[in-house]
Image (spheres, grey):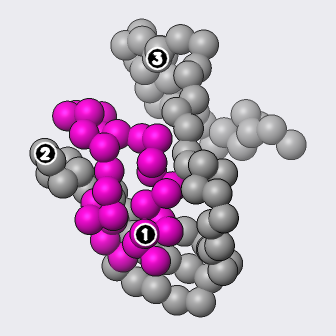
Amino acid sequence: MKKKLKHLFDNLCCSQCKCGFDEDSIEIKREETGLLVTHLTCRNCGKSFGVAFLGLNNIEIKNPEDMALEVQEGPEAISYDDVIDAHRFIQSLEADWQKHLPK
């Protein structure tokens, strides 16, 4: 199973040391029918990328390139001012905060 999951991370690398992930980077914490709980860690520098809950059904990989995740580039990076603005907005929410959610 780890070999199959490794293909999910083939195009990605550690954000801290830029080392690629291998199948030893993936630890399966729990496995149930249709669900895997995994933990991803960089084997070079030890940075933890947290726990992921993967809902999977019978993974069959014919072409590993079909499964690889790709880094998506956004229009621009989030600035410190963006974070401060978001923080102030969240702090100012009142009891009717749900009006800001899309319907």
Q: Nearer the viewer, mark 1 or mark 3?
A: 1
Q: In the displayed structure, does residue 77 sit left or right of residue 68?
A: left
- The numbered disc on residue 45 is 2
Which residue appears farthest toward the front when viewing the image?
Answer: 62
Distance (Cα) linking label 2 and label 1: 21 Å
Q: Residues within 10 Å of mark 3 (few under 14, many from 20)?
A: few
Q: Secondary structure at mark 2?
A: loop
- The numbered disc on residue 60 is none
- The numbered disc on residue 3 is 1
For residue 14, what is the image quadrant? top left
Residue type, label 2: Cys
Percent coordinates x, y for residue 100 in the rendering: 73, 34
**Residue wearing tag 3:** 78
Q: Nearer the viewer, mark 2 or mark 3?
A: 2
Q: In the displayed structure, does residue 42 sit left or right of residue 58?
A: left
Q: Residues within 10 Å of mark 2 (few under 14, many from 20)?
A: few
The correct choice, above or below, for 21 with respect to 88 in the image is below
How many circles with numbers are drawn on the protein?
Answer: 3
Q: Residue at x 60, y 13 (%)?
A: 75
Q: Residue at x 43, y 60 (%)?
A: 6
Residues shaded magenta: 1-28
Distance (Cα) linking label 2 and label 3: 26 Å
